[in-house]
Image (spheres, rainbow, N blue to C red):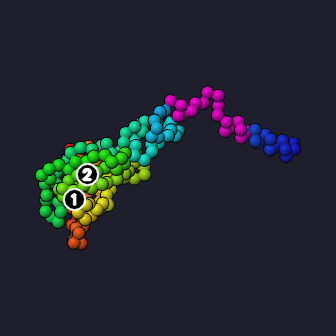
Amino acid sequence: MSKKLVYFFALLGAMVVFAPACGDSDPCKDVDCGVNGTCFEGVCVCNVGYEGDACAEEWATKFLGSYLGSDVCGGTTYNLSKPAVITRISESKIQIANFGGFDSILQADVKLASSSDITAEQIEYNYTDPTGRKFVGSGQINGNTLTGTYTVTYSDGTSETCTFNYTK
């Protein structure tokens, strides 16, 4: 048998092995990922800022609402006398009014805790408020409870490390 025929049969065999069989279906045929995602192997891969089976849920929405709770800074507990209120800036950014009881506004990014997570339950912030206080930290939501840590640096250069625990 000539080399050309050997190569031809090898190529033909490869085509038969790797070609889709009759009746094979597209795993994404009946999967709707909406405008915020793309189907891959029958599963929606959502754009940043979205999650859920059809990529219709914004990350920010689970954080929205009014929270009461406390902050512990330098060993002293401060109970919020008025709620910290979280509003939406975008699908992956929130604004927190009265964060830490400072009666100011803080902006935070909503993120996945790790690249393997399918839901975003983490916030991160590195934000200087209008009075010059800088807040750097992170938090996570679990149900209706938002917890985390931060360092606040005041305009005079002093700082405190704090934890917080807020409930909707």
Circle 1 Cα neighbour tier, 10 Å, few/some/many (<14 / 14–19 / ≥20) = many
The mark lying in front, picked from 2 and 1, is 2
Where is residue 126 shown, x and y percent of the image? 32, 61
Q: Is residue 10 above or below residue 95?
A: above
Location of residue 1 (image quadrant): top right
Location of residue 164 (image quadrant): bottom left
The residue carrying mark 1 is: 163
Where is residue 27 shown, x and y percent of the image? 54, 34
Circle 2 Cα neighbour tier, 10 Å, few/some/many (<14 / 14–19 / ≥20) = many
The residue carrying mark 2 is: 96
Q: Is residue 122 above or below residue 161?
A: above
User: From where the camera sits, is residue 164 visible?
Assistant: no
Q: Does the magenta run of residues contain 23?
A: yes
Q: Please, what secondary structure does the residue beneath circle 1 have?
A: strand
Location of residue 61 (image quadrant): top left
Residues at marks 2 and 1, CA–CA distance in whole angstroms: 16 Å
Q: Which residues are magenta?
A: 13-30
Where is residue 125 shown, x and y percent of the image? 31, 58
Which residue is drawn at the image coordinates 31% and 49% (left, top)? 94
Q: Please, what secondary structure does the residue beneath circle 2 have?
A: strand
Residue type, numbered disc 1: Thr
Total number of numbered discs in the rendering: 2
Predominant secondary structure in magenta?
loop
Which residue is drawn at the image coordinates 20% and 47% (left, top)? 67
Residue type, numbered disc 2: Ile
Which residue is drawn at the image coordinates 13% and 58% (left, top)? 78
Q: Is residue 118 above or below residue 33?
A: below
The residue furthest front is 130
Where is residue 29 shown, x and y percent of the image? 53, 31
46 to the left or right of 72: right
Depth check: 57 or 120 in front? 57
